[in-house]
Amino acid sequence: VFKRFVEIGRVAFISFGPHAGKLVAIVDVIDQNRALVDGPCSGVRRQAMPFKCMQLTDFVLKFPHSARQKCVRLAWEKENINEKWSATRWAKKIEAREKKAKMTDFDRYKVMKAKRMRNRIIKHEMKKLQRMASKKGKKPGKPEKAAKGKKPEKAPKAKKPEKAPAPKAQKAQK
Amino acid sequence: MAGEKAPAEKKPAEKKPGKKKAGEKKPAEQKPSQKAAGDKKKRVKKYHASRNPTLARGIGRYSRSAMYARKALYKRKYTAPETKIEKKKKEMPRATITKPVGGDKNGGSRVVKIRKMPRYYPTEDVPRKLLSHGKKPFCEHKRRLRASITPGTVLILLTGRHRGKRVVFLKQLDTGLLLVTGPLAVNRVPLRRAHQKFVIATSTKVDLTGVKIPKHLTDSYFKKKRLRKPKHQEGEIFDTEKEKYELTEQRKADQKAVDSQILARIKKVPQLRGYLRSTFSLSNGVYPHKLVF
């Protein structure tokens, strides 16, 4: 039922407070509500932090309890937590949300155009397949419908002006 | 008294030659240089010591009339420079003028006063207005411009017949209004004025370096024209007020001149033309205070 546990070395994501958005490693447990926490590679000083503001990630480091910052840092860099974190979907979602909030009016227009173009392509293909299916449906045409399932990979919706060429590339694919 | 007189004497003694010297207070320095130069123009200022010896503090030896004689003030009579008054007196403006008069047996001309007496005196005088401070007329107001609005910024018009349209900002005019253009070929917004308050400034900017805006595009160029002929009666006034706006050749020429420069720059930025063609609108879940423009 529970997969992520509070343990020494668990990397946690701070959701609110002054260090919101940063990763820390749990170094020790103080009492029921607080942990001693350290984030040498993410700019968080060693301090006590309530569990409430921490959200556990999948990463666990190996170091003994109450290890000093140097050891935490070594373990962190050995595991390459920063890179692993930015590769997770969680981090990507956060980044996408931030980008969306920063979109300017022009960006919104570009996204709208890109979405519309993409939807048109999809619809076009769908209609094609439907037509083919309805034609061959009179004949044995069930296998055609299976092809409908494979649709162009839905690229993440986080779009910024740099990504405008990406929907254009999708268009080129089709 | 003696003490009072001593400085009192010096002051008139100083002032009078001082006036001739145009209020100079450095006689000692100028004496040697100016003796040679212009002795007649500027009298060498030699201040005599007090001619009224002090008997006790505040008391002088001689009376006022004795001092008059001692200082030879009967010789020193200064009149204020009268040249201006004399000039004005000479050049009195004409008070009357003779005008020809028509009609038979009328004498041909009349002598008419140029400046006439008032035909009406109000029963109550208008009270003198109190001094006010800092109330400037509109032409002297300080014009401000938001930092987010610079030449080339794309603005969203919020009011007027072009509401919702995205438009390129050119410059701020003297009255503080913003000169703005569609460009016309893109979204049918001509060279027009817009008010700063009723405009959203986006962060999108068109590079307008080297674009020359004709100098004759000022507020008076854009101002609405009103006909005012006092001869009309009440009924006719409503007809003559021009409601229709008529497009002049000059406006077309100016529009072309400005737009040709801007369109070239718009084409360089991908998708900008389409952006300017679109209109801005809000829909569900879109809150202006949360949008980044």
Image (cartoon, coloured by chain):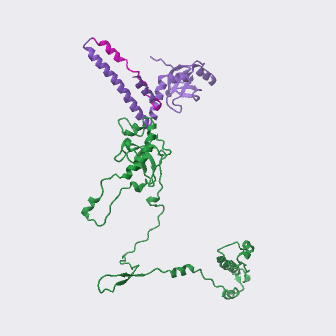
Chain colours: A purple, B green
Furthest residue in direction right, as rendered: B32
Q: Nearer the viewer, residue B174 or B16?
A: B174
Q: Is residue A142 left or right of residue B253?
A: left
Evaluate whether residue A54 shows in this view.
yes
Is B211 placed above or below A54 here?
below
A167 left or right, relative to A144: right
Q: Quadrant of residue B13?
A: bottom right
Q: Position of residue B21 (x, y in %)?
A: 66, 75
Q: Is residue B158 above or below residue B16?
A: above
Q: Position of residue B1 (x, y in %)?
A: 69, 81
Count of marks, rendered view = 0
Observer-nearest residue: B100 or B36?
B100
Task: Identify the image quadrant of the N terminus of chain A.
Answer: top left
* Residue B194 seen in render: no
- The residue at 40%/72% (across/down) is B126
* Residue B49, x across and y down, in percent: 74, 80
Q: Over which residues does the magenta segment extend?
A: A140-163
- Does the magenta run of residues contain A153? yes
Q: Horizontally, is A64 left or right of B258 in the view?
A: right
In percent of width and height, residue B8 lies at: 67, 79
Q: Is residue A165 magenta?
A: no
The relative height of residue A1 versus residue B65 in the rendered view (above or below) is above
**Quadrant where the C terminus of chain A is found in the figure:** top left
Q: Is residue B19 above or below residue B269?
A: below
